[in-house]
């Protein structure tokens, strides 16, 4: 297995196109596409600016669309897999906090987008969406995670490695009969 690391701004379609060309020119083919970019901004309704709203939607939704537009035909030809990383905040039955307008609605849009991609590219491409609960990531500017000790039934935040293991399952052949699925890994947060 060869792993290639490339960096680009996924909110810029032209950069993704250049990235794809570089990969193809170097002999790298895409079998698995993971859309994992995310931005967390919150605010009261009267505090939301157009710039903040657009930035959150550009990273959380538009980037996923651009990735699919650029790579889906190759994935289709190779019978590949797409995994979108959303959030439990995007699920219709999970409403928490009072200021998550931008983040939660963008993740809801991503979940629905993933279902449409799954529906339109099956059976050639498997597409699933992972919805983690609260996880120790760099999305949080306040790194004091003690405030989340009672956030779920397991009484702790997820480690990134725990969410990565669920993601690995969803892109592996072990989940070969799953497509269009929305998988929750939240330590029981939604039922607490």
Image: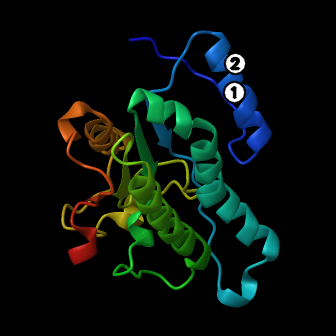
Q: Nearer the viewer, residue 118 or 22?
A: 118
Name the residue at the bottom extreme.
Answer: 46
Image coordinates of residue 157 in percent, x first then y, are 33, 56
Q: Secondary structure at mark 2?
A: helix
Q: What label sits on residue 19 in the rendered view?
A: 1
Locate residue 132, reporting x and y percent: 36, 57
Q: Whole-Å distance between the Cαs marked 2 and 1? A: 5 Å
Compared with residue 169, is residue 48 higher up or lower down, i.e. above or below? below
Circle 2 residue = 22
Establish if 189 lies above or below 67.
below
Mark 2 and 1 residues: CB-CB less than 8 Å, in contact?
A: yes
Locate the C terminus and report the quarter of the image it occupies: bottom left
Residue 123: horizontal and vertical position, in percent?
33, 45
Which residue is located at x 69 percent, y 27 percent?
Answer: 19
> Can residue 39 be seen?
no
Q: Quadrant of residue 56?
A: bottom right
């Amino acid at each position: 297995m060869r792993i290639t690391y490339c960096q680009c701004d996924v909110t810029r379609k032209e950069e993704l196109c250049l990235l794809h060309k570089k990969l193809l020119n170097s002999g790298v083919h895409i079998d698995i596409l993971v859309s994992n970019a995310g931005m967390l901004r919150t605010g009261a309704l009267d505090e939301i600016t157009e710039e903040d709203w657009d930035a959150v939607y550009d990273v959380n939704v538009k980037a996923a669309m651009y990735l699919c537009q650029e790579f889906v035909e190759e994935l289709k030809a190779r019978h590949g897999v797409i995994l979108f990383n959303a959030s439990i905040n995007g699920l219709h039955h999970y409403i928490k906090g009072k200021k998550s307008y931008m983040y939660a609605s963008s993740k809801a849009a991503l979940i629905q987008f993933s279902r449409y991609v799954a529906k339109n590219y099956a059976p050639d491409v498997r597409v699933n969406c992972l919805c983690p609960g609260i996880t120790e990531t760099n999305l949080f500017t306040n790194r004091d995670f003690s405030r989340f000790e009672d956030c779920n039934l397991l009484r702790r935040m997820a480690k990134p490695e725990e969410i990565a293991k669920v993601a690995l399952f969803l892109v592996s052949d072990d989940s070969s009969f799953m497509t269009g699925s929305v998988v929750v890994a939240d330590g029981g947060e939604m039922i607490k």
